Image: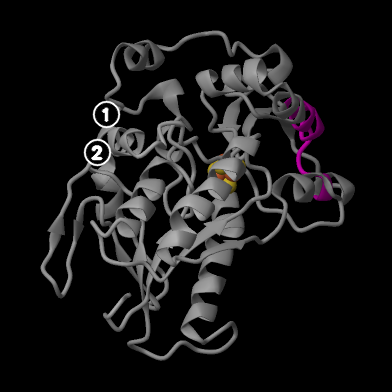
Amino acid sequence: MNTSTAPRVLSLGAGVQSTTLLLLSAEGRLPPLDAAIFADTRWESAEVYAHLDRLEKEVAIPAGIPIHRVSTGDIRRDALDPSARYAQMPLFIRGARGGEGMLRRACTDEYKLRCLKQRVRELLGYPHPQRVPAGVHVEQWIGISLDEASRAVGMTNDVQYMRLEFPLLFLPGGAGPIHLGWTRADCQRYLASRGFASTPKSACIGCPYTSNARWRRMRDERPAEWAEAVEFDEQIRNGYARAVASGKPLAGEAFLHRSRVPLAEAPVDRVPRSEWASRQTDLFEELADDEVQERGCSPWVCRGEDDQ
Ligand code: SF4
């Protein structure tokens, strides 16, 4: 039971780091959590939803940690629906004159952070539009590991009702601070020792930050999801459906793959240097070039964004 005044809430992306935090709390190596929140874009791989179901059944429920599944909407459907609000994914763009660029990423804020914040307000007893009184906050746990600690250093929070904590690095507390200092590889070893070696990467099926390795696995092992991504890629070529319907198509073309060719024809079999390196070691300490989205997307940490 949490005896501190601020509820402890885990941002559960269901990837390696946040799964580790849930297990560590459930087995008492970290303080007890009051809740875990999974922000669902409704376009995750089936293996992510299966992992989440298993986590809930085998870890969270026995430990008395409720998992809240929240959602702002269906990111895929909204992009293709001319009447829907949408938030931009970081699509790769080839401009009308051949120039290359990317759309500004707004999807994480809209489909992950917004609903997470709403649920935190509800848990505190001050749902929107009520004002959360000064001093009322949750201890918001975020799964950032030592190899990516710089993300925590620069992380800003625009709401005072969440106090951000990074327990894989360091956790202050009444019973004394906890210095874990775990890398992603430490998390993977720990998960393997607990029977969760197959923890998947959490990310939208059609996320443009996807690496060639993940595209290949999708194509070869989950053909229905690959077909969805290929179809989506074709459908967003001229931009989002609502923009097209309102007479504002892209001045150029949009693509899911960084090569800026249709996904069905994209060079996903090309193995970048970073992938060769990761095949030779299980220490994923470097994140470079085409390794993006091997680590997944969470409300606070979109792990592909620095690599574009
Ligand atoms: S996984 Fe990709 S598309 Fe989905 S919310 Fe994160 S950045 Fe956006």
Q: Residue at 58%, 35% (x, y): give it.
A: 102
Q: Quadrant of residue 15?
A: top left
Q: Residue at 33%, 87% (x, y): give it.
A: 135
Please state if 290 lies on the left or on the right of 192 as rendered: right
Q: Secondary structure at mark 1?
A: loop
Vertical relation: 219 (above or below) 270? below
Please state if 267 lies on the left or on the right of 73 as rendered: left
In the image, which residues are magenta?
Answer: 230-242
Given residues 56 and 242, the one toward you in this image is 56
- C-beta proximity under 8 Å, tags 2 and 1: yes
> Residue 183 shows which numbered tag?
2
Please state if 50 lies on the left or on the right of 73 as rendered: left
Indicate which label's residue lies in the foreground, 2 or 1.
2
Ligand 1 quadrant? top right
Q: Secondary structure at mark 2?
A: loop
Q: Residue at 60%, 42% (x, y): give it.
A: 50
Residue receiving disc 1: 285
> Residue 82 shows which numbered tag?
none
Q: Residue at 57%, 8% (x, y): give it.
A: 269
**Dot placed on the residue nearer the N-terminal end, 2 or 1:** 2
Q: Amino acid at mark 2?
A: Thr
Q: Amino acid at mark 1?
A: Glu
The spot of residue 193 in percent (x, y) is 31, 35
The spot of residue 140 in percent (x, y) is 36, 66
